[in-house]
Image (cartoon, helix red, strand yellow):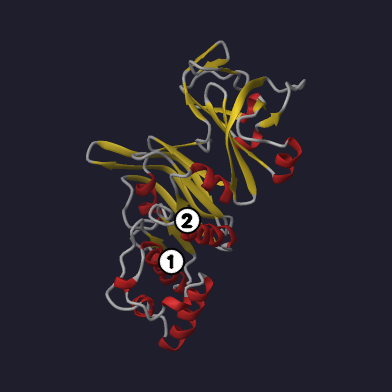
Amino acid sequence: MNHAYHLTNLKFSYGHKEILNIESLSIKSNKITALFGANGSGKSTLLNILAFLIIPTQGQLNFLGNPAFTKKNPHYRKQIAFLTQRPYLLHGTVKQNISTALKIRHIPTPQHAERIATSLDHLGIANLAERTVDELSDGEKQKSALARALALDPDILILDEPFSYLDQASKNTLESFIKHYHKTLIFSTHNRLQGYALTGEVITLVAGKPVKSSLVNLFSGQLSNNTFNTSQLTITPPDQTTAGTHISIDPSQIVLSKSPLSSSMRNHFQGRITAITEELNNILVTVNAGETFHVVITHQASSELRLNIGDKIWLNFKSNAVTIF
């Protein structure tokens, strides 16, 4: 199966306010998909529809190749585990929480012990099994709720802003889990660069509509004569671009150099490095060149360039690295 979901002409409204308007969107099976967007962009609404918790106002949704929201629907919700920003845990121990979820899903009792142990071990929290919920930190609660979801062995795992209330150690654990997950996982995040580092499958919502942009290096401005003016910089987008008030530049398509490059790239800006951090297996370089750019490079490229905070650096990128909308 190529797609976990395929949405066609799907809309959702609260009263007269349209929240989602998706002409066509596919989410691949057995892939990690990140969902980006500002507050109010429709991320949580879309996740709730994908989890079959709410029904769209109109449109078609296919789930694992089958049409959803028909009177003859099988119980698709049982194939999905949905973790909210602040997951609810029942009173009692972590082990009891997981066992209760297994009972609700009618998982045979003889399987409970193995499923509980496996899910806790997978997240490195076997020591929490007998702890009560009241004794857990926010990070421990999040991981316990995730273990409860994993014990159900869902076809689809959906996480709504899973990093929001975690300390750094818990974030690192969750990042590692997501990166190595082998089934279909969809998560929303406000940390655009973190999500970008975790997966190449990206959905970005702007005012309820998907756009082909990760929203990294996002600038607003005006398009005129095939140039885009942000008020600070003039950027060349792809040829024959006719409309748009926002642009985004792919952070992995920006080339850094200590001196100007002679190349076919049409955008060249000099700036100063303001931050260098590690994002999973890559280096994130922040550069102020009138606008603030984020650039993702390899450790090798960083070593070869011998980058330091405060250095002057050139940003170089092709026009087709620019998305305009």
- The x, y position of residue 69, in whole percent, is 36, 56
**Is tag 2's residue or tag 1's residue first in the polypeptide sequence?**
1
Amino acid found under the numbered disc labelled 2? Gln
Amino acid found under the numbered disc labelled 1? Lys
Quarter of the figure with the N terminus: bottom right
Q: In this view, does 136 lie above or below 249?
A: below
Instruction: Tell me which residue sits at (74%, 44%) in the image.
Output: 300
Q: Is residue 265 above or below residue 199?
A: above
Q: Residue most toward the left?
A: 15
Tag 1: Cα neighbours inside 10 Å, few (<14), some, or many (≥20)? Answer: many
- The x, y position of residue 158, in whole percent, is 44, 58
Q: Is residue 4 above or below residue 99?
A: above
Whole-number angstrom distance, CA of label 2 to CA of label 1: 13 Å
Q: Is mark 2 on a helix, strand or loop?
A: helix
Instruction: Tell me which residue sits at (48%, 80%) in the image.
Output: 117
Is residue 74 visible in this depiction of the protein?
no
Residue bearing mark 2 = 168
Horizontal placement of 304 versus 52: left or right?
right
Instruction: Tell me which residue sits at (61%, 30%) in the image.
Output: 310
Residue bearing mark 1 = 143
